[in-house]
Amino acid sequence: MDARPSRPTPAAFDAIGAPGRDLSRLLAETIEASVAAIDRNGTVTYASSYFEELFGFPLALFVGKHFTSLMTTKERAIAMMLLDKMTTGERFPIATWLLRRADGTAIWVETRVTIIRDSDAAVTGYITVTRDMSERRLAQQMLARTRANYDALVRRAVYGVYRAERNQRMLDANPAMLELLGYDTREELMALDLSVDVYADASDHEWLVRTAQNGELEDWVEVTWRRRDGELIDVRLSLRMVEDEDGGPPVFEGIAEDVTERHRRDERLRRSERMASLGHMLAGVAHELNNPLAAISGFSQLLLRGSWPDDDRKALETIGREARRAERVVRDLLTFARQGTVTRSELVDLHGVIRHIVDTQRYALDTRGVRVLLTLADEPVYVQGDTGRLEQVMLNLVVNARQALEAMRGERAMVQASLELQISTTIDDDDFVVIRVSDNGAGISPSLLGRIWDPFFTTKEEGVGTGLGLSVVHSIVTEHGGVVDVHSELGRGTEFMVRIPTVGAPDNVVPVTVTGDEATAPGLEQTPIGRALDILIVDDEAAIISFLTRFLTSRGHAVVSASDGMHALRIAEQFTFDVVVCDLHMPEMDGVELIRRMRMLPTCTVTRYVLSSGDGAGSPMMGRAEALSVDGLLAKPYTIDQLVSVVEGMPAH
């Protein structure tokens, strides 16, 4: 038996007095909505069969009863208020409210009310159409929640997110966009013209708009933007154009990421890799140069001890002077090649280093009209490293700035502008000291800026510099765990920024602040020759053997030579030597291995060993030599005084 109630009779609509009763009844039973006819007093005279499906109550409990009879107290109060308003003729087209089903569950419904009037315009009743709005309400809530979550996500995003009309005038932007461009309020951003105030190059803006309109824009592009303070930043941009459905101007939605620091890190990494590759090559070049330089320098020193006509003596002095000049270049090459290796570690007062370099350069700066502005952090700054090499960093940067300013001297005199060199230090949040050395010179062309770290690259006139200064700066800063960057604009000057980790200064340690030239032989005083020594010289360079043999023989020593390790071992098996002077790098058997084998020979139990190398101090091979605990080290090229000190100055066993 059909449980649904019988369809209402046409009489159910009679009280309404509306025409088209049959059609109304047909529509009421067809639509998925609860249709009810209510008389002027609020009594339900008709309810469509969908009422039971919607609310779960039998029609018999609703038809013939007051329309609020199945409502809760709260619902009834709202309904009566609405009824009063409608009774007075107030228009009430739609109400959305929460009602209860028969099982107690709550559903959101939308009720549309039509007022029925007689010929005299008096209210005779009402027609209500009530729809289930639960799914729509849920969808609206989900949409609202999604929109709120999306808005919160955009607000919290670390990327700048914005919408702009024609990618020109911003309509909206998140806080990250404010921070990225350096503005305080959204209103300031809204007032900007992106093509003029944000894009460093207006042609980039034009290209983006044109490409987006043609549908050819890639997912991500990189452009240069200008912050509020004028700083240029590299921005990775994702841009989407949305057409306005009403025919208005297109809107661009953009996501922007500041990749300036990432580019700097990538450039530093590429630079370090390039420097490491060059350093490995230059280390070999420096070693090969030091061998002939040692012979040239040694023979020139030896010959200068004799009597010569003035012209010949000047020629010999020139040979020695140019050899020393070449030695400095080779020393810089070795400094560059030793990236990542601090040869000496001590507590260094960095402010003391800066003041020392400025004092030593004061005369040269003053005579060239350069004003020095020194702004150092209030607290002392200490770093762990090599004082002499840190002084070399500051010296190279100061001299570089001085030369840049000197080139501007005539031009600045015409406009009566001063030449300024500024040096400052600050401590950042990571406990790194940031040293800034800046000048207001001509600046460096962007096309050259990426090459300034390359060895032998220089924009100076021939003979003014070797092009190794900044390469050495990069090498030394890197080996101290720091980084060095540069910012330069044509016509505005150049700024070098060095970041080095700081350390605390223990109370019982006195920081090193003043240094001198310590590239000397081991700290042994030269002593007059006490007795003639039997000396074995092992070197694969014939010129070195010739020089050492001639000089040491002139000192009264008996000298035997060998050109490789195996030859030296055969000699040592038969003879006893007081001193062995051995080259570190030799084919087949290097100096370290030779000394290990010689120490096992019964003829060499009291022999002293001196290792020489063109690698310079701090190289990995010299580290092996030091670990061998030899009696002396000679870094080629060396002076004859250093040679005498090492070979003769040590007490005999």
Image (spheres, helix red, strand yellow):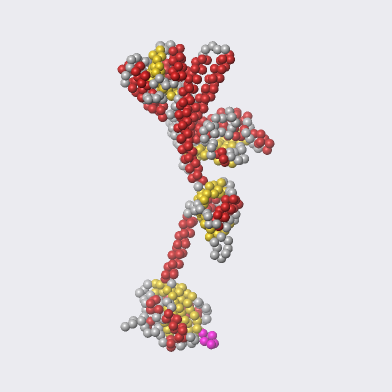
In the figure, 165 relative to 298: above or below? below
Residue 236 is situated, as x and y percent measured from the top left of the image, at 51, 50
Which residue sits at x=54%, y=85%? 121
Residue 621 is situated, as x and y percent measured from the top left of the image, at 41, 28
Q: Tell whether position 119 is magenta.
A: yes
Task: Find the magenta span and give its range.
Answer: 117-121
Query: Which quarter of the figure has residue 311?
Result: top right
Position of 400 compared to 283: left or right?
Answer: right
Assign the C terminus to one quadrant of the image.
top left
Query: Which quarter of the figure has residue 35?
Result: bottom left
Residue 122 is situated, as x and y percent measured from the top left of the image, at 52, 85
| Dominant secondary structure, magenta | loop
Query: Which quarter of the figure has residue 364?
Result: top right
Whether residue 413 is visible here, answered yes or no, is: yes
The extreme right residue here reads 414
Which residue sits at x=46%, y=35%? 277
Residue 103 is situated, as x and y percent measured from the top left of the image, at 35, 74
Residue closer to the observer: 196 or 431: 196
In the figure, 158 relative to 311: above or below? below
Which residue sits at x=58%, y=48%? 200
Which residue sits at x=55%, y=54%? 211
Q: Tell whether position 441 is magenta.
A: no
In the figure, 322 relative to 6: above or below? above
